[in-house]
Image (cartoon, helix red, strand yellow):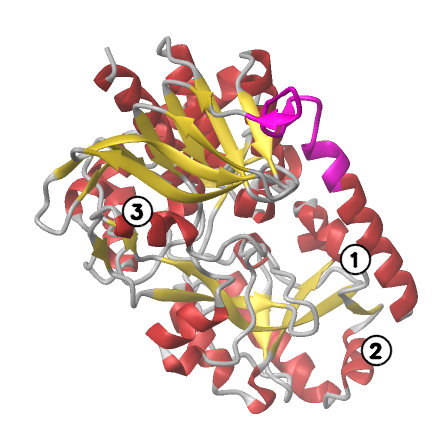
Amino acid sequence: MNKSKRIIILALVVIMTVIAFTGCNSNTSEEVDNKVVNLTTDVVIIGSGGAGLAAAIEAKDGGKEVIIVEKMPLVGGNTLRATGGLNAAETSVQKEQGIEDSIASHYEDTMKGGYEKNIQELVTVLTENAADAVEWLINLGADLNDVGRMAGASQNRSHRPTGGAPVGSHIVKVLKDNAEARDIKILTETTATEILTEEGKITGIIVTDKNSNEFIIEAKAVIVATGGFGANTTMFADLDNSLSGFGTTNHPGATGDGITMAAAVGAGLVDMEEIQTHPTVVPSNGYMITEAVRGNGAILINSEGKRFVNELQTRDVVSEAILEQDGKTSFLLFDEGVRESLSAIEGYVRQGLTKEGETIEELAEVLGIDSEILMATLETYNGAVTDGEDKEFGRDDMPRSLENSKYYVIEVGPAVHHTMGGLKINTLAQVLDENGQVISGLYAVGEVTGGIHGGNRLGGNALTDLIVFGRLAGQTAAKDLQ
């Protein structure tokens, strides 16, 4: 597929996404006699990703009036880009599929993946409430019937739609539909600029709409769900200059606004220097290739056609290994069997991100790689699958051999993906000041917070974080306002 056709396809995808996730319930500020007037509600939520929508639904179900403000033209934030799955242990879906897993194992994997830098109490909340989060979403209408494995996990616990379809956009649609069914007001293209306080109490926020009208939304509770700062290249490079010049997988709105606003009213910060790169991002356009491709059996090869890493190591380890290769990129290699196992791959093929060959020899020719070296790499790997032991790199989960033509590769390299640091919160999603004291009326959820993921986030734990703590924030705010 030539470049112009790919551009047209990508443009159509963007248009369809906007149509799907903007709707009649998206509003701007109210006007009376052509003058913008302030709004009043019980709870105002800044950000409409998975965390903000989950919080809104729970606060509304708790009997409170809710307004969501979203600076982008469509709801969803980075959640729309999530493809791999939602991690949870001891779920009904796992049990139906005969998958043995435990909350303790999920906890241990999360702490190990975060290099034990995680705040233990937050990880306990995350893992102990993950199964309930899955059941809650299913009850709202979500399809989470496919369970796979993401890097750093010891068991199959990443829940996603049937066939391995992208999970984020599906969850956003389910949550948005449920928010609209509850008449929750969503103000798109409305940017929060300041959190208001009076005598130490939260009183609302100042916002600006798409017409540059500034107004106040008065509220007794503010939930910050703005996401991280992965799209703020200056901010992440200042914190870690080794990331200067890196691309990002984040949507344009992930610029750290929520951190800045909350810090201005005394919120404490934690782990701000902990910034994660994702190893499999298309260098030419920043498109992230889900970890589930590797989880379903793909391998990574370098420009010589050789494997160089355990593909299911944590993201930071795999990213570092790729950066050590010539050109600082690698090739994600898989066959027709992997493609058939994961419907998300169909999107990559349609977008022209893959290079293909009916045989290994043909693929090697397309890549300009010595065919004998590439064939030897696959023979060794397939032998490891048969033997059940990867003597080269110690990969312990090899679900299938790569021997079903045709064959595919996608060139990938690291890009900034997740910012583990952010606002300090407690186990009820209440924001803490620098001294660890609760800031009354202020809550935070999702990537805007810090401490949950420590030094490295495991794939599949972001959605768990969004739903578990999003629900908690909505529930806590509603109870606090009784």
Q: Residue at x 29, y 43 (%)?
A: 106
Instruction: State whether residue 40 is above or below residue 316.
Output: above
Residue 371 vertical placement versus 332 (above, below)? below
SS for dot 2: helix
Residue 394 located left or right of residue 301: left
Q: Earlier in the sequence, mark 3 or mark 2?
A: 3
Q: Give, as a single range, the part of the protein colored magenta.
A: 17-36
- Whether residue 152 is in magenta: the answer is no
Mark number displayed over residue 349: 1
Which one is in front in this view, the residue at disc 3 or the one at disc 2? 3
Whether 80 is drawn above or below 454: the answer is: above
For discs 1 and 3, the disc positioned in front in the rendered view: 3
> Residue beneath label 3, please?
262
Camera-side residue of 367 and 430: 430
**What SS does tag 3 mark?**
helix
Q: Please tell me in which quadrant of the rendered image residue 408 appears.
A: bottom right
Residue visible at 59% across and 23% down?
30
Residue 362: which numbered mark, if any?
2
Q: Nearer the viewer, residue 395 or 205?
A: 205
Q: Looking at numbered disc 1 in the image, what kind of residue is underneath it? A: Val
